[in-house]
């Protein structure tokens, strides 16, 4: 008898779970004295003012300042607890920001996923919080490509 693999729900992090655009807009508006809104950003190609703020604060902790989007926590909990799906978060962030992402999840009460993956999609064997390229939080490796 073969063991059935758990079903998984995959979420992008920025602007799906956490308010990436709103965080950059708030910082840019405070720094520049502007009143930009999400409607002023219509693609991932950020306007120059926002790119400057992003570049300035990315290494200074920008990612752990993001608030959850409305309903994100409830939706993830429903899928995780009621539907019994494993949660996987994908992000295009560089893996060097993994700890900021993990800290943001903890501080904002976003349910910890079974896995956080930067840049590429890798399916993991064990069900514990992981971060980047198959690394378990304690440093042991265990991964399989799906």
Image: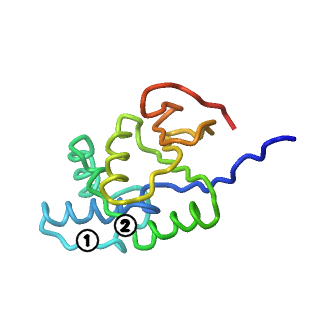
Mark 1 crowd level (few <14, some 14–19, many ≥20, 10 Å Cα):
some
Mark 2 crowd level (few <14, some 14–19, many ≥20, 10 Å Cα):
some
* Relative image position of residue 54 (x, y in whole percent): 27, 50
Residue 139, above or below 131: above
Total labels drawn: 2
Q: Residue at x 20, y 60 (%)?
A: 27
Q: Residue at x 56, y 53 (%)?
A: 87
* Relative image position of residue 99 (x, y in whole percent): 34, 40
Label for residue 4?
none
Closer to the camera in the image, 13 or 48: 13
Residue 41, above or below 97: below
- The answer to whether marks 1 and 2 mark residues whose Cβ atoms lie closer than 8 Å is yes
Quadrant location of the N terminus in the rendered image: top right
* Relative image position of residue 30 (x, y in whole percent): 14, 65
Tell me the residue that label 2 is attached to: 41
The residue furthest right is 1
Closer to the camera in the image, 101 or 81: 81
Closer to the camera in the image, 49 or 130: 130
> Which quarter of the figure has residue 144?
top right
Quadrant location of the C terminus in the rendered image: top right
Tell me the residue that label 1 is attached to: 36
Q: Which of disc 2 and disc 1 is earlier in sequence? A: 1
The residue furthest top is 140
Residue 76, above or below 8: below
């Amino acid at each position: 008898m073969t063991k059935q693999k758990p079903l998984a729900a995959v979420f992008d992090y920025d602007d799906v779970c956490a308010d990436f655009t709103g965080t950059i807009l708030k910082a840019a508006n405070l720094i520049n004295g502007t009143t930009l809104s999400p409607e002023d950003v219509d693609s991932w190609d950020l306007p120059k003012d926002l790119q400057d703020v992003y570049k300035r604060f990315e290494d200074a902790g920008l990612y752990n300042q993001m608030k959850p989007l409305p309903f994100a926590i409830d939706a993830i909990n429903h899928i995780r607890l009621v539907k019994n799906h494993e949660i996987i978060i994908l992000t295009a962030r560089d893996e060097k920001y993994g700890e900021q992402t993990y800290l943001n999840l903890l501080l904002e009460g976003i349910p910890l996923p079974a896995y956080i993956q930067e840049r590429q999609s890798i399916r993991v064997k064990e069900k514990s919080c992981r971060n980047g390229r198959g690394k378990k939080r304690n440093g042991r490796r265990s991964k399989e490509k799906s």
